[in-house]
Image (cartoon, coloured by chain):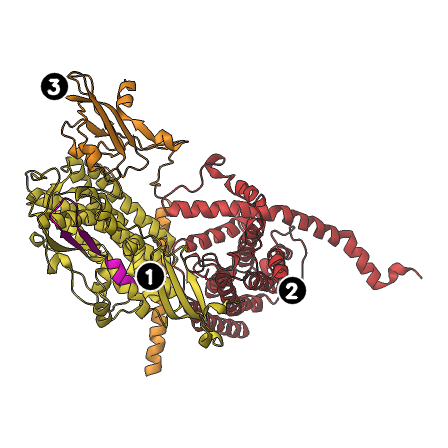
Chain colours: A orange, B red, C yellow
Amino acid sequence: MKTSNGFILYIQEILTGAKSLAVGLWITLKRLFSPIVTVQYPRKKLTMTPNFRGHIEAIRFDDTKTHHCVACGLCARICPSHVIKVQGEKTKAGDKKIGRHYVIDFSKCSHCGLCVDVCPEQTLKFSREYELVYYSRWDTVIDLMQRLEERP
Amino acid sequence: MNITQLPYIKDIFAFMGSDLMAAVIGLLIIAVFVPLNVAFLVLVERKVAGHIQLRPGPMEVGPHGILQTLIDAVKLLGKEMVTPGMTDKVLFFLAPILVVVPAFVGWVPISFSPIMQIREMNVGVLLIFSFSSISILSILMAGWSSNNKYSLIGAVRAVAQNVAYEIPLLLSTMSVIIMTNTFRMSEIVNAQSSVWHILYQPVAAIIFIIATTAECNRAPFDLVEAESELVSGFHTEYTGMRFSLFFLAEYTNMVIAASMATVLFLGGWFGPFFPGLIWFVIKVYFLIFVVMWVRWTYPRLRFDQLMNFAWKVLIPIALVNLLITAIVLKVI
Amino acid sequence: MLNIKTIDDATVNQRVYQLNLGPQHPSTHGVMHLLVTLDGEVVIKIEPIIGYSHRGHEKMAENRIYEQFLPNPARMDYLSGMIFNHGYCMAVEKLCGIEVPRRAEYIRVITSELNRIASHFIGAMDYAMGLGAITPFLWGWDDREQILDLLEGIAGSRLTYSYGRFGGVRNDIDQAFYNGTRRFIDRLRGRFWDYENLINQNIIFIKRSKGVGVISKEDALTYGVTGPSLRGSGVKYDVRKNEPYSAYPEFNFEIPTREAGDCLARYQVRMAEIEQSLNIIEQALDHLPPGPVRSKVPRFVTPPEGECYLTFESARGAVGFYIVSDGSRIPYRIKVRAPSFSNLFAMTKICPGHFLADVIAIFGSIDVTVPEIDR
């Protein structure tokens, strides 16, 4: 009695196993003819979301036609990787400082966005560049103010 | 006395006259066809894998990446063949050479169409089986000589696995052989002119395909190279062209196995509308597609389960199947 | 050919050899070294050697202000970066007594649960890949990709989000995220059948996982195993329920447990948790309260002197952040209790007696992240 029971179980296992394998084949066959989900990157490109966090960039404001950086240095203080260096100067005595040089080395940047949050003048934003490949490490050291002037 | 009257001399001349030429031409065709076929199959494999996994596979070299494998072959040719220190240099050198021999010889007795067969042999089926056993020897040589624990584990697994799976393979073949009473490939095909053997012997056909998948070390029986456990198995230490010879042998063995299955179960060249060769090729590539499809669907068996599957499931079923076939044939 | 010189003299005469799985190996999830002592293919002893990706995050914390440590927690466990990020924020908020707006709590829950699904997908599918099934792994990545797209839409980054801030989150969620999450939930629910039948019902998968690597309830508690691995052993412990934090008490969800304690149980717990996470996200989206997402917090927080310990549930188990403050802007000490560390060392107990292939399966089913072990 016991052995025949075992035999039935043995046959059952083979049959359920074969069925599960056939179902698996059917599932992969369906996927074989479904559309692909990848993007052939250099040929096709995805659009970045508006919130994408690239390296930081200075915003050009419409009222002054330039950035609002006052070279307070808060961003340089909060940066976890110490990659920001800001230099400002006063145009005339008693006036606010204006940022002249804003150098970041974004190869060391961790894109955390703390500098953008901390900025009292809110003159920083994230760029949407993601193809950050260069021939030299020095190419990753950029002056945001200079970029702002060069940009139309 | 005219020496041509001596029977053995006459046999030699006859051999040189037609059969030798046929053999030479056939082997040349094989030597050209096998690497090209492998290049094509590797591409097909990558495309099948890609589309099952919702990605396009190779797309860059040539339209839809059809030249990708040729470029890969060129790259492999240009690579340095590294021989690691402390290896058994002779065996390490011989293993990839030995592995391609059965892959080429196995083509000889296969009848692709009524006129395309390199050499008809009385023991064509047996010849393929016996030569395919040699490839195990080369895998063992490769694994042993590499002086790498992963390679050795892979090689030891390969030997045990192949010994186990040759039994159901031969048993399932036997149930066809006792139906046709011949080992000649063309006669086995001719016996299926009206009904394919797969209709008489569905169980044997499934066992045959499972066992050949295991013999070719394809997933889900690819414990020999099990990349998640053994890195790359027996060819971990091989580079460049030596590595690609193992690759070539693997895919060629697949084609030979599929051809065997076609001859034994799927009616060889028989089929409506098209000439025989085209039907043969369609059947072979369909079987190869099934093997690839299976590879990209299932997980890998564990070693003891693999053995259990062979000894506890395949061999009993194959034996029962053979017994039933014999009884039915005797009664009829 | 076996290199038996590495074994001590007492065992030289035995047929025992050692195999180095890693530091570079296809299935060690990073730079991880398992020194396996084998007899044939049967494991006698297994010794995880860790520290290859030690970056000293805890020491780094002692040299920077609280804000500057914000990007770091996500780099400890890169697969559940969002959860770690929020966890660190919660720990600092607890230390400083900062109130978090309810909307921010809800957003934290939604993003954490999305991140948990993404991480569980990798955990479960990577286990399947360890068994040799590559296709489900890539399908899992496809589903995970949807989550990454959603999170990128609000956080701007795909892996190390730095989305949480002290007293809330960086920015509010938008309608696109709201709709996208709804669509994702429907899409994922439609795909469970495929996963269930392709992996869970597959006879080879069941044979490979059932009864393999059983962590008993006692062992799990002894080794301090947490997360899905603990719940797979039948212990109903989830920090989200047992020590509720954030907005979790407001949601209605189950803690899936399995009694078996084997690899299959751990896999099933993970897949069941994905469904529970979907429920949580749905409830949170339904009852998303209006209001600000960030409370008024000083630009640089200065916690009072003292210490705090906050534990939360990451995708791998209970994580603890222990922060000691000396009253300055720079933490005196931050200690992180990493679940992967405890979970990994349960392997030393359960692996002996299994085959070499099972080691990979067990390692995959426990689902550790190596950078989290080493920190």
Q: Give the amino acid at mark 2.
A: Val
Q: Residue furthest right?
A: B1
| Residue at image location 18% in from the left, 67% down from the top | C235
**Above or below C10: residue A146:** above
Chain ID of residue with mark 2 = B
Which range is magenta? C321-344
**Above or below B119: residue C38:** below
| Residue at numbered disc 3 | A94
Measure how far apart labels 3 and 1 are at the Cα level.
66 Å
Q: How many marks?
A: 3
Answer whether labels 1 and 2 touch (C-beta < 8 Å). Answer: no
Q: Give the amino acid at mark 1.
A: Phe
Q: In the visual, does C141 lie left or right of B215?
A: left
Instruction: Report if residue C128 is visible in the image.
Output: yes
Q: Nearer the viewer, residue B191 or A41?
A: A41
| Residue at image location 58% in from the left, 50% down from the top | B81
Quarter of the image where the N terminus of chain B is located: bottom right
| Residue at numbered disc 1 | C363
Measure how far apart labels 2 and 3 are at the Cα level.
105 Å
| Residue at numbered disc 2 | B123
SS class of the residue under badge 3? Answer: loop
The x and y percentages for residue C101 are 6, 43
Measure how far apart labels 1 and 2 are at the Cα level.
49 Å
SS class of the residue under badge 1? Answer: helix
**Above or below B86: residue C44:** below
Chain ID of residue with mark 1 = C
Quadrant in which residue C196 is drawn = bottom left
The x and y percentages for residue B104 are 62, 54
3 or 1: mark nearer the eye: 3
| Residue at image location 55% in from the left, 44% down from the top | B73
- Kindly indicate whether the residues beneath marks 2 and 3 are on one polypeptide chain: no
